Image (spheres, rainbow, N blue to C red):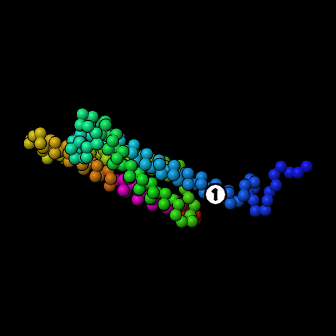
Amino acid sequence: MAPLFVRSEGSHPCHLPREKGVKYHAFMRAVKIASFWNICILLACLLGIAHDTVTARVCLEYFTVHHPQIIEPQYANPTNMALIWGVLATWWVGLIGGLVLIASNELGRAPKLGYRQIALMLSKALAVIFIMSMLTLAVSWIIGNARIAGHETSALDFQHRLNTVATTHRASYLFALIAIIVLARIIVSKRRVLGA
């Protein structure tokens, strides 16, 4: 009886040609990379929404007056502003940050880390960014209150709230930049240890 499978010369042990096997693994690697990149964008947007949920309730005018009008004024409440600007202001950070982390893991011949491990590190970093941003908000609020103590007016109160939120947002971008750099260095270091 003839064998059911005939292994041709140079074929893969699983009866797939070696070339197809290599292409399959390359395709699956690309899928994992694309999935991680999407996760980076999603996590950045979630952080942005959580962040703006707080800041929009401190100074809604930061979003309605000092940003382009996206929706009709009657719908410009803190929740809607957080959902809209939380995404618009952070998706590109996830895009660029994800690309940096992917490059840190893919370039070079050292062994690569699993993207699940990197995603976990990223999640922890984003949690730290949120905490640091909220601390910045609190400190900025306290300092602003001390400066206007005894001279409270509606104009000063508005400027105080606006400055507090603006400072918090600028600090958040700085924290994100630092986190991306630190994570990239950690990835490269871990790869070197694995390849040693």
Q: Name the residue beneath numbered marker 1.
A: 23
Residue 192, relative to residue 25: is it above or below? below
> Which residue is found at the position 39% from the left and 49% from the top?
91
Residue placed farthest to the front in the image? 72
Question: Residue 89: image x %, image y %?
Answer: 33, 48
Question: Residue 104: image x %, image y %?
Answer: 48, 60
Helix, strand or loop: magenta stretch = helix
Instruction: Tell me the crowding category of disc 1: few under 14, some 14 to 19, or many 20 or more residues within 10 angstroms, Cα based.
Output: few
Question: Residue 63: image x %, image y %?
Answer: 25, 43
Residue placed farthest to the left in the image? 151
> Which residue is found at the position 28% from the left and 49% from the top?
169
Horizontal relation, residue 170 to residue 193: left or right: left
Q: Nearer the viewer, residue 15 or 49?
A: 15
> Which residue is found at the position 86% from the left and 51% from the top?
3
Q: Which residues are magenta?
A: 175-189
Q: What amino acid type is highlighted by mark number 1?
A: Lys
Horizontal relation, residue 32 to residue 5: left or right: left
